[in-house]
Amino acid sequence: MSNSTSQPAGTAPWIAAQTQTLLAQRGHAWLLAGPSGLGQYELALALVRAWLCEHPTAQGACGSCGSCHAIAVRAHADLCVLMPETAMLELAWPLSEKAQDEIESKKRKPSKEIRVEAMRDAVEFAQRTSARGRGKAVLVFPAERMNVYTANALLKTLEEPVGDVKFVLASDAAHQLLPTIRSRCLGHTMLWPDTQSAMRWLQGQGVPEKQAQVMLRAAGGRPQDALQYASISELWPRLPRAVQLGDVAVFKDWTPAQTLDALHKLCHDLLAQRSGSVPRFFEAADLPKAGNWLSLTTWSKALSEAMRTVEHPFNAGLMLEALVSQAQLALNSKT
């Protein structure tokens, strides 16, 4: 079978290369770790596809068998996906019947953590016989979203795996995982693609070259994250001066997390510029000569504090006004 069918169309070349490397390893649990936007989820899915494929190659899954189709339509009996319910909905994985009913009836909102109930279902799944005879797989993403109870439930299964089951944990913050979980897995640090490869891949996703350059820079060189900047690529170069003017409208329709991320990047680049370094997220010409060491470092610490509570149910409008006001004050402090 030709290699062209081993990876779905559009698979990034650095993901394909890592898939082949990891498939050559033996073990029952892997931990894919690195910053966001490097393709942890995509690599984890490529691995489980290959593990469960009816006609796998050294490069990965065939992409055309019944097993590959079942994963594509999110209905494989031998694959258990553990994610926060918010991520399940975003990535089109079905929730359990009970969870779906509770959310639809507005008894509760989708969870942002991997719930212990879902982990218990996964433990039960691991003990069952394979339906298709190719073994079973459990995909956990993002793994740092397990709370202590969920993590302990997984730990017991990792320590004493039952039957032919493999685990892949993908994380943007592996340092937050229990050391005992990290020690039970084969660790893999995600490869960082070079700029040319990332640009070619983005253009392959239909992004024009100039727009791709802005998006990739805004994402700090992380290609998967760069796609999230498609809708704001024209706005990004104008954002620093808009913030200096206190223009709240520049963040219209942004979530608090997205706003904080952008302000963090702006603060980083202004500090880099002051120290004589090259800005990472914005072009130097787009950055105003603003703030002083004290105002910028104080602002940086305040942003870090805000990140700890960004998911709390604050009034988004008031939080946005406070963040922009804080940024304006820092940028307009006398040098």
Image (tube, rainbow, N blue to C red):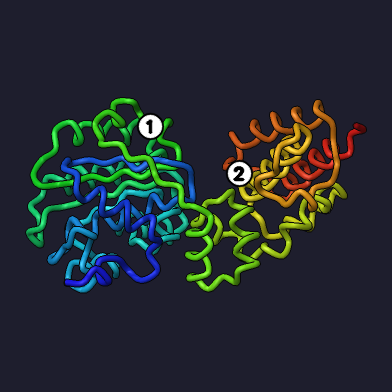
**Can residue 69 be seen?**
no
**Can residue 296 be seen?**
yes
User: Would residue 31 be found to the left or right of residue 234 on screen?
Assistant: left
Please give the name of the residue rendered at 25% of the width and 71% of the height, measured from the top-left corner: 5
Please tell me which residue lies in front, 84 or 334: 334
Depth check, mark 1 against mark 2: the one in front is: 1
Q: Earlier in the sequence, mark 1 or mark 2?
A: 1
Please tell me which residue lies in front, 1 or 174: 1
Q: How many marks?
A: 2
- Any mark on residue 313, and which? 2
Please tell me which residue lies in front, 281 or 322: 281
Please give the name of the residue rendered at 72% of the width and 44% of the height, measured from the top-left corner: 266
In the depicted structure, whether residue 111 falls above or below residue 134:
above
Quadrant into which the N terminus falls: bottom left
Please give the name of the residue rendered at 59% of the width and 40% of the height, measured from the top-left corner: 312
Q: CA distance from mark 1 to mark 2?
A: 25 Å
Label 1 CA crowd tier, 10 Å (few <14, some 14–19, many 20+): some
The x, y position of residue 121, in whole percent, is 23, 47
User: Would residue 141 be found to the left or right of residue 297 on screen?
Assistant: left
Name the kind of residue labelled 2 in the image: Pro
Give residue 215's quadrant in the image. Answer: bottom right
User: Would residue 280 be found to the left or right of residue 144 on screen?
Assistant: right
Name the kind of residue labelled 1 in the image: Leu
Please give the name of the residue rendered at 49% of the width and 57% of the height, measured from the top-left corner: 224
The x, y position of residue 116, in whole percent, is 32, 40
